[in-house]
Structure formats: C-alpha cells, structure tokens
Image (tube, rainbow, N blue to C red):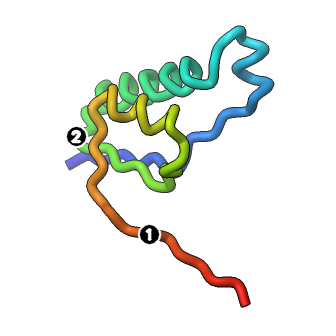
Amino acid sequence: MRRAEVLGVYTNDNDYHKAGMTRSSMLRQMMEEFLRQAREKKVQSIEMEGVDAEDEDLAMILKELGFERYQTSYMMRKSL
C-alpha cells in the first residue's frame, strides 16, 4: 500500500496576502494540489500529523476534503 504522510502545513501571512488570497483559500489550494499529486502516484492512504486542534481553518478544510480524525490523544506538558 502506498502511503503519504503530511508532517505539517505552514503558511506565511505575507505569502497569501501578496497573492490576494485568504489563509483558508491558500490552505485549500495547497491541500488540493497535494491530493492531486498523491492520486497521480497511486497513494492509497494519507496520514497527517501535527494538526493543531485550534486551527479551525485547516480542520474545516481537511474535513471538507474527506479527512477524518482517527486519534483522540493529548499532548501534555508540565513546566517546573
């Protein structure tokens, strides 16, 4: 099975503002291009790590593109 992993999605505010886009439209365009390339390479599964639960723009776009949340774990830290 061919699998692709997305380790993170980052945008620079200046990049999408210069292109006359919103952050949401830039993220959607990036993910649609990634999916297009994955399909060309016959990828059967895509896993995304490091999706910030508070990044509502990215979470909404991923859901709209058919991604499903499959883990319910927490990353926790305590400073002493």
Q: Which class describes the residues within 10 Å of circle 2: few (<14), some (14-19), or many (20+)?
A: few
- Please give left or right for residue 13 compared with residue 37 in the image: right
Read off the residue under disc 2: 44
Nearer to the camera, 43 or 8: 8
The residue pinned by badge 1 equals: 74
- Rendered residue at 36%/45% (across/down): 4
Q: CA distance from mark 1 to mark 2?
A: 27 Å
- Residue contact between numbered discs 1 and 2, judged by CB atoms under 8 Å: no
Name the residue at 59% across, 78% down: 77
Q: Position of residue 37 (x, y in %)?
A: 39, 27
Q: Residues within 10 Å of mark 1 (few under 14, many from 20)?
A: few
Which amino acid, by three-letter code, is at mark 1? Tyr
Which amino acid type is marked by label 2? Gln
Q: Which quadrant of the rendered structure holds the C terminus?
A: bottom right
Estimate the x, y position of residue 41 in percent, counting from the top left: 32, 32
Mark sitting on residue 31:
none
Q: Residue at x 45, y 54 (%)?
A: 49
Q: Earlier in the sequence, mark 1 or mark 2?
A: 2
Residue 38: x percent and y percent? 35, 32
Q: Quadrant of residue 71?
A: bottom left
**Helix, strand or loop at mark 2:** loop
Q: Is residue 70 left or right of residue 49?
A: left
Residue at 54% x, 27% y: name it. 27
SS label for mark 1: loop
Residue in the foreground of this view, choosing between 64 and 5: 64
Kindly give the residue lying farthest to the bottom in the view shown: 80
Q: How many marks?
A: 2
